[in-house]
Amino acid sequence: MKALVCILLLLETFVFVVQQQVDGGLNENEISQQISSEDGRQNPPQTDTLRAEASTDRQQYCHLCFPDIHAALRELTATVTEQKGNIRALETRLMDEMKKKNEEISNLTLGQEELRKENRDREIAFSAGLTQSSSEYIGPFTTHITLTYRNVFTNIGNAYNPITGVFTAPLKGAYMFRVSVFDLGGSTSTAYIVKNGELVVMANDVQAQDRLSSSNGVVLILEVGDVVYVRLWSNTRIYDNENNLNTFSGFLLFPLR
């Protein structure tokens, strides 16, 4: 582009010179001055122009390479702030989830403990014989007496008291009870299961000679605190020894609400 401008200027100068020569002419010095004047007017000092162009190019290059570093920093700061907010929200959500899980685990553990306790409460069973080792007759008595089965085989839940011979229901439910009686004969043996002072079922046998035995059982619905025990009928007797011929047993079938 610069070369074309120079050529045009030279052509313009040439035409001017020719015109002057046609009109009356110019001397050589005038022509030289004219050319110098035109060249100086149309072509300013190259050094300043090149410097200005170089500065402009550098600015344009900087703008191209670094469009707006402040804008970029602002955008980066906004991004970091946004990510921090996201991280805080994520941490909060994770903490809430962990708290919820811990509560669920705690509730599950508590539920398991309650279930184990409930199962332990449901573990109720006992069985006992009259004597521990000696052979002895019990009865006859002139009145009914409560039998104390002192030789305890099983007493899960400790609801049976071997000192009093009384079973006390620790929770409401359906219970199974059973009693057996034995004697060597020549008498009458009668024992019965009692619930809260009332006769429920009886085991009875009468033999003029030889041995006699009998047994009976019943399922009872008991409330908490109800009592069950065995009584020997008046004027009857039983015989027991180390073979545990007379027994009293009971256990919880299932609880009731």
Image (spheres, rainbow, N blue to C red):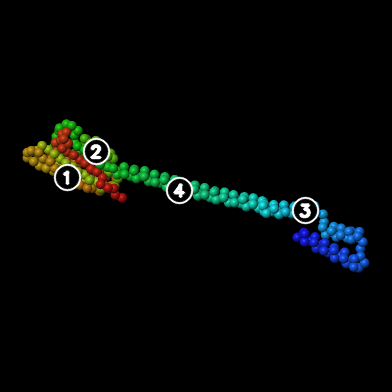
Name the residue that disc number 3 marks.
Answer: 50
Q: Which mark is residue 100?
A: 4
Q: Residues within 10 Å of mark 2 (few under 14, many from 20)?
A: some
- Give the left or right position of residue 7, taking residue 255 as reference: right
Q: Badge 2 is on which residue?
A: 154
Residue found at x 82% / y 61%? 10
- Between marks 1 and 4 in the image, the one whose residue lies nearer the viewer: 4
Helix, strand, or loop for circle 3? helix
Task: Name the front one of labels 3 and 1.
Answer: 3
Residue corresponding to mark 1: 216
Q: Above or below — where is 238 with respect to 62?
A: above
Q: Residue at x 93, y 67 (%)?
A: 24
Real-space Cα separation, disc 4 to disc 3, in angstroms: 74 Å
Q: Nearer the viewer, mark 4 or mark 3?
A: 3
Give the camera-side residue of 141 and 89: 89
Amino acid beneath label 2 = Thr
Query: Which mark is on residue 206?
Result: none
Measured Cα–Cα span from mark 2 to mark 3: 115 Å
Residue 48 in percent (x, y) is at 80, 53
Task: Say whether marks 3 and 1 touch (CB < 8 Å).
Answer: no
Q: Nearer the viewer, mark 1 or mark 2?
A: 2
Pointer 3 local density, CA inside 10 Å: few below 14, some 14–19, many at least 20: few
Label 2 sits on a secondary structure element that is strand
Upstream in sequence: badge 3 or badge 1? 3
Q: Amino acid at mark 3?
A: Leu
